[in-house]
Amino acid sequence: MHRLTNRRILLGITGGIAAYKSAELTRQLKTAGADVRVVMTPAATEFITPLTLQALSGNPVHLQLLDSDAEAGMGHIELAKWADLILIAPASADFIARLAAGMGDDLLTTLCLASDAPICLAPAMNQAMWRDARTQQNLASLKQSIDIRVFGPGSGAQACGDTGMGRMLEPAELALLCAEQFETLALSGRTVFITAGPTREALDPVRYISNHSSGKMGYALAAAARDAGARVRLISGPVSLPVPERVECVHVESAEQMLAAALDGLETCDLFIAAAAVVDYRPVAVAEHKIKKGADEIMELRLTKTPDIVATVASSPQRPFTVGFAAETRDVLAYARDKLARKKLDLIVANDVSAAGIGFNSDDNAVTLIGADVSDTLPKTSKQQLARQLINRIAEHFHEQTDTSGQDS
Ligand code: PMT
């Protein structure tokens, strides 16, 4: 089921008594980490209310093809492109017939025509309708012409009193079959927290202490972790980058706020990566009003240490696998090893920020991944490419550790 993390499932519900099971199916898909959007045919709304599906999916339910509100927000073409997989459950004989005929006379058939996503059908109908040669012919022609998968139906007692083939599979079975349509990735089902960007430590209402971090490295890591199947929380200082799709982002300013966001829900986090350039010292006091220029040539600031976020995470009782970065301008590997030990990290990414064209605010980077028995040099490349390499290697070490400690499989 981990394979459903971050996946976008479009659940189509057509008219049939089994529609009541679609509520539980929605819940199970959501619990497995999928983002679910529901499309109902008019007949489906006679069996179960859109409000129920809206509450369970956490998204508005789509009902009509020609809906000016929807077209302004997520219209039928956007929905068709949005889906990673379309699951029609229950799929009535009528819907299967219209799909096989290539009709686009309602929202659901139109979406199926317009989408490149695989379509899965969970048929549910009376046993005689299922056995009918026309239903079987429609299914055979669909299988021949498009990427369609048919889940079930099962056999047993039917709502109409008959017994035989035509029962919709149970929600748990359907959710599992959906998950099996996706491959298992390096971080499938894992939750990853990533800090990124600089922090800002206020001096007065208009001034702050900060650094040149652009957030590019951390944001690239977030996208790479997402692509590796993880549920990602990006904890970002102020940067001007768009948040990667399917990544939850908590925007913060100061080190204190970054720490609070890191500790919030830490028990759900499997892997913590600290790529942020956290300001080490903040002013002891923040002036209430803008500090005025005085007559003195020199002004002294009293600073105090900010909390060490990654060290706090690594020492917490719910300690996730913890990876830090070390931005150094000299003796890079030695200082990085020192931080690895002092902050009690599992791995550290040594980053020589004195070299031209890499490090702070550049598009490229080059690093060395260091652990107790690891020293892995990753030469200069784009931050996106480097992030993918790092996530793959970090995932390998994470699995080695969790497998040997018997915590997980
Ligand atoms: O953002 P970009 O422009 O893309 O640049 C990327 C980067 C150079 C910022 C990034 O690759 C990097 O090296 N990040 C770490 C920057 C840093 O502040 O390193 P540090 O050696 O000072 O800190 C060591 C580790 O402790 C880091 O994981 C840091 O996030 C963490 N730390 C530091 C201080 C603090 N108060 N709390 C922390 O969690």
Image (cartoon, grey):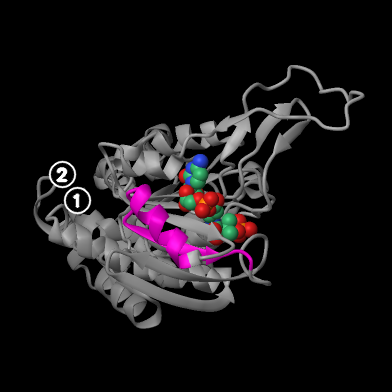
Residue 353 visible in the shown view? yes
- Tell me which amino acid carries mark 1: Ala
Residue 135 quadrant: bottom left
**Residue tagged 2:** 159
User: What label does residue 58 carry, if any?
Assistant: none
- At 36% from the left and 48% from the top, the residue drawn is 342
| Mark 1: secondary structure | helix
The Cα atoms of the two marked residues, 2 and 1, are separated by: 20 Å
Instruction: Tell me which corner region of the image, top left, top right, bottom left or bottom right, holds residue 89.
Output: bottom left
Q: Which residue corresponds to mark 1?
A: 172
Residue drawn 56% across and 77% down?
Answer: 380
Residue 53 x/y as whole percent: 38, 38
Q: Residues within 10 Å of mark 2 (few under 14, many from 20)?
A: few
In reply to whether residue 350 is colored magenta, the answer given is yes
Figure quadrant of the N terminus: bottom left
Residue at the outermost top position:
288
Instruction: Name the spot of residue 271 as percent of width and height, x first.
Output: 34, 52
- Mark 2 lies on a secondary structure that is loop
Task: Kindly identify the residue that appears in the image at 13 percent across and 48 percent down.
Answer: 158
Magenta part of the chain: 333-354
